[in-house]
Image (tube, helix red, strand yellow):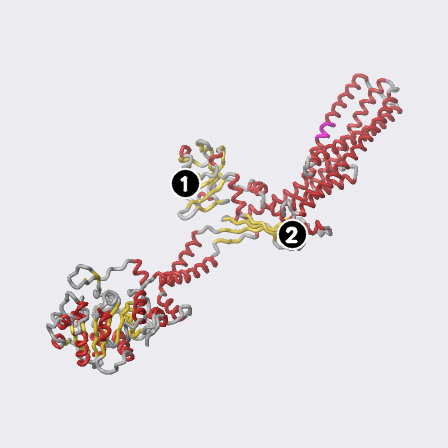
């Protein structure tokens, strides 16, 4: 029955053949073993040679800002869970360059030290054999490496080499503690004897870090994030190859953050103290001058006693003068405050705002203004300037600012009017004093100035004491919960993860390699692959031959190779319509070296061992070979019969094996194709069928010449030989086309040289390399073919044939 071209393919390739996959994995088990060993080795080397990275942690409790607001602004300023936007602000402060720069200035990280090993540079921190003291260095030497080789506990060799500054290259030997002076830099290396004894003859490196380099290094390893959404606690983590440096940095950063909060709280008090000190300094100078005048007056005029009336005048005038001077100080404060508000400066930087303004409304407005400005900073840290909540805040700031400026002007106007009243009272008392005697009046004036300035000085002293107490008692609302010393852990390399990844790769890599190998491979690799490519039946599989004898069936009849051919003999019983005597079995292949002649010899031998009378006909007129294996001369053969020189009976030769005969090809003719199309060919086969039980025809490869196709019209069974890891997959496509077009009937495939060990009869394998090869040339004298030795495969080819 004629089969369609599509019917030749065995089954849907989309189906997953688990057994086939397991078989492939078992066949390539050495890939998995080598991959497993290699991946584990690489993993262990990576773990061993990679510098470990440690992570330090600390937590900070932020000031509670979870107050709820009933206003729309309050809802806009909070997230769904009620946390205020200032959490983002505080995180931004903790990650700010300014705070990190202040932190690293407290740590010994301006100079980086390294121990040089064959595999990596190991950073050093606390435990190092020496320290570098910088005497003088130009900026261009920042971030440049200096090499130090220890000679002994007292001497060392230092080297500086730079491709960008070859004129500054330097090398020399020095003692520890000795000044090293070079062009552009001067340093001193101080020894640490307790570590020098443990590190003889080692190589080191140090780098004079620039400020930007240090800040970038510590900024890159820092991560700040909320501990959870329900608590005002931030988690600070820092990764570093030195655990001590990681803990020192986090602890210093947390403390600097707390100090910054305290500085913000005391900044107003600090500036207030500065303002008070300036006023006290002026009054102190004034008091000194007055005391000098009083001393001079007493020395010149002698002791002068004031009358009761003068004492009364002095007391009244002193009280009024003190009130007026206090009023003048408040007016200066108001002018100072007005200037700050008008220039849009933050009131947190203004000193007089904390000196106790006389008007409660003014203090309230200042407080509101400060709160709104602080809230604006918090909002900008979490949202953009164009967001509605920021616009609402800016509108409120503008309204409070206008009210504050108006209130300042109103208070100042009242104080100016009060000063005018004080000035009128002073003028009235001074008119009355003019009636007092001259000496008494002069003493009264000096005494008045002294008492007034003394009272103001005492007043400022009191304010200074109050401000100093407020500054000293200022504490941060934030608090360090956990020190970094208790949270250090190793994060890289993660041994468990790396080993897990190595095991996964050791499995995936061979799978990818085998898949890639199969995708790139163009040759037949197994019987299963043949059954996927065609419906032409596979009648047998012959293994790899480890012996050098082609007649393996006759010489080793109990071998598994012989069993393989017995299996083929059994399967051949199901082929052909003629079940009687004289079956003609034609054996061919696509190209040379596929084992066609080897299979012909051994299949004929296994048929003969069963008691059948078998003849092998050498129809390969271009390159006869079989006669050598059977020890028969090739002087007379088929070519002589076809040209009429001999009869078929004259060229039938007996062999050393019972029931096995050979008709050799005979001398190579100049026109083999024409001879094989001779009408005598049919007569020859008819005569041989009548005389023998089986006629095995050895033909040339059909991929090179068409001789075998021409002879198939006389055959009952056609066997096509494919060699594992040698025959091309495209051969099967060509075979399918010929089979579908009914050019070949009763066709079966024999897989030769198989390495598969799972099936009965071909477990020992076999190899075929005796030079049954064909090559084409246009000017040869043997009918267009010459015998060629199979080329030695390259390493790449041998790898992809496994």
Q: In terms of depth relative to the viewer, which is nearer, 133 or 575?
A: 575
Residue lying at the far left of the rendered structure: 645
737 vs 294: above or below? below
Q: In terms of depth relative to the viewer, which is nearer, 483 or 543?
A: 543
In the figure, is residue 278 to the left or right of 617?
right
* Label 1: few (<14), some (14–19) or many (≥20) C-alpha neighbours in 10 Å: some
Q: Horizontal and vertical percent for residue 170?
A: 41, 34
**Residue pointed to by mark 2:** 232
Q: Horizontal and vertical percent for residue 650?
A: 11, 76
Earlier-in-chain disc, 1 versus 2: 1
* Label 2: few (<14), some (14–19) or many (≥20) C-alpha neighbours in 10 Å: many
Residue lying at the far top of the rendered structure: 300
User: Magenta: predominant secondary structure element?
Assistant: helix
Q: Horizontal and vertical percent for residue 258?
A: 63, 45
Residue lying at the far front of the rendered structure: 679
**Residue pointed to by mark 1:** 149
Query: Which tag is nearer the camera, tag 1 or tag 2?
Result: 2
In the figure, is residue 172 to the left or right of 271?
left
Q: Are marks 1 and 2 in contact (CB under 8 Å)?
A: no
The residue lying at 49 percent from left, 51 percent from top is: 53
Which residues, given as a range, are shown in magenta? 278-283
On whether residue 592 falls in the magenta region, the answer is no
Quadrant of res 282:
top right
Q: In terms of depth relative to the viewer, which is nearer, 43 or 24?
A: 24
Question: Which quadrant holds the C terminus?
Answer: bottom left
Q: Horizontal and vertical percent for residue 483?
A: 59, 50
């Amino acid at each position: 029955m004629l089969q369609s071209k599509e019917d030749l393919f065995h089954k849907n390739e989309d189906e997953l053949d688990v057994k086939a996959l397991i078989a492939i994995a078992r066949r390539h088990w050495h890939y998995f073993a080598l991959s497993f060993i290699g991946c584990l080795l690489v993993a262990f080397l990576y773990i061993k040679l990679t510098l470990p990275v440690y992570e330090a942690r600390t937590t900070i409790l932020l000031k509670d800002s979870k107050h709820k607001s009933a206003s729309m602004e309050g809802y806009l300023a909070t997230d769904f869970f009620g946390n205020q936007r200032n959490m983002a602000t505080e995180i931004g402060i903790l990650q700010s360059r300014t705070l990190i720069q202040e932190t690293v200035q407290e740590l010994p990280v301006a100079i980086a030290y390294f121990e040089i090993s064959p595999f990596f540079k190991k950073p050093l921190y606390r435990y190092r054999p020496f320290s570098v003291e910088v005497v003088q260095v130009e900026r261009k030497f920042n971030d440049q490496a200096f090499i130090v080789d220890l000679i002994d506990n007292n001497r060392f060799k230092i080297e500086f080499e730079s491709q960008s500054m070859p004129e500054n290259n330097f090398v020399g030997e020095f003692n520890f503690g000795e000044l090293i002076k070079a062009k552009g830099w001067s340093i001193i290396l101080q020894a640490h004897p307790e570590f020098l004894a443990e590190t003889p003859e080692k190589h080191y490196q140090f780098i004079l870090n620039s400020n930007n380099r240090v800040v970038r290094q510590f900024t890159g390893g820092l991560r700040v994030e909320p501990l959870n959404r329900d608590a005002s606690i931030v988690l600070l983590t820092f990764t570093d190859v030195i655990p001590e440096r990681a803990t020192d940095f986090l602890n210093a950063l947390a403390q600097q953050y707390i100090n910054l909060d305290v500085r913000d709280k005391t900044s107003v008090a600090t500036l207030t103290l500065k303002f008070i000190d300036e006023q006290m300094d002026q009054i102190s100078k004034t008091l000194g001058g007055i005391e000098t005048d009083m001393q001079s007056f007493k020395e010149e005029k002698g002791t002068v006693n004031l009358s009761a009336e003068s004492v009364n005048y002095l007391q009244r005038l002193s009280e009024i003068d003190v009130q007026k001077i206090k009023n003048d100080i408040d007016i200066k404060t108001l002018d100072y405050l007005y200037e700050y508000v008008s220039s849009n400066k933050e009131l947190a930087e203004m000193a007089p705002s904390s000196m106790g303004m006389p008007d409660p409304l003014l203090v309230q407005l200042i407080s509101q203004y400060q709160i709104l400005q602080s809230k604006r900073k918090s909002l900008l840290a979490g949202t953009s300037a164009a967001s509605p909540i920021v616009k609402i805040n800016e509108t409120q700031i503008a309204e409070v600012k206008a009210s504050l400026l108006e209130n300042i002007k109103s208070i100042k106007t009242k104080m100016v009017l009060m000063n005018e009243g004080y000035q009128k009272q002073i003028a009235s008392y001074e008119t009355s004093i003019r009636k007092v005697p001259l000496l008494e009046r002069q003493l009264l004036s000096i005494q008045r100035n002294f008492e007034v300035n003394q009272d103001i000085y005492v007043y400022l002293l009191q304010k200074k004491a109050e401000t100093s107490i407020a500054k000293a008692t200022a504490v941060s609302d934030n608090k360090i919960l956990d020190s970094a010393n208790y949270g250090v852990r190793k994060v890289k390399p993660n041994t468990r993860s790396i080993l897990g990844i190595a095991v996964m790769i050791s499995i995936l890599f061979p799978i990818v390699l085998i898949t890639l190998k199969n995708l790139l491979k163009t040759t037949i690799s197994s019987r299963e692959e043949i059954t996927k490519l065609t419906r032409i039946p596979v009648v047998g599989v012959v293994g790899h031959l480890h012996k050098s004898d082609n007649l393996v069936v006759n010489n080793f009849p109990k071998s598994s190779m012989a069993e393989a051919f017995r299996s083929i003999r059994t399967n051949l019983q199901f082929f052909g319509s003629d079940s009687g005597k004289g079956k003609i079995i034609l054996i061919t292949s696509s190209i040379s070296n596929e084992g066609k002649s080897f299979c012909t010899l051994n299949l004929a031998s296994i048929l003969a061992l069963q008691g059948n009378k078998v003849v092998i006909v050498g129809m390969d007129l271009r390159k006869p070979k079989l006669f050598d294996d059977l020890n028969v001369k090739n002087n007379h053969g088929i070519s002589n019969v076809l040209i009429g020189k001999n009869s078929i009976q004259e060229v039938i030769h007996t062999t050393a094996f019972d029931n096995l005969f050979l008709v050799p090809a005979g001398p190579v003719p100049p026109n083999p194709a024409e001879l094989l199309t001779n009408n005598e060919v049919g007569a020859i086969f008819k005569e041989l069928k009548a005389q023998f039980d089986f006629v095995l025809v050895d033909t040339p490869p059909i991929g090179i010449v068409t001789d075998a196709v021409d002879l198939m019209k006389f055959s009952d069974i056609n066997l096509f030989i494919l060699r594992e890891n040698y025959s091309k997959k495209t051969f099967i496509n060509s075979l399918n086309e010929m089979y579908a077009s009914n050019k070949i009937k009763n066709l079966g495939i024999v897989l030769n040289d198989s390495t598969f060990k799972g099936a009965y009869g071909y477990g020992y394998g076999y190899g075929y390399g005796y030079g049954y090869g064909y090559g084409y040339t246009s000017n040869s004298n043997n009918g267009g073919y010459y015998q060629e030795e199979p080329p030695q495969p390259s390493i790449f080819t041998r790898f992809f044939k496994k």
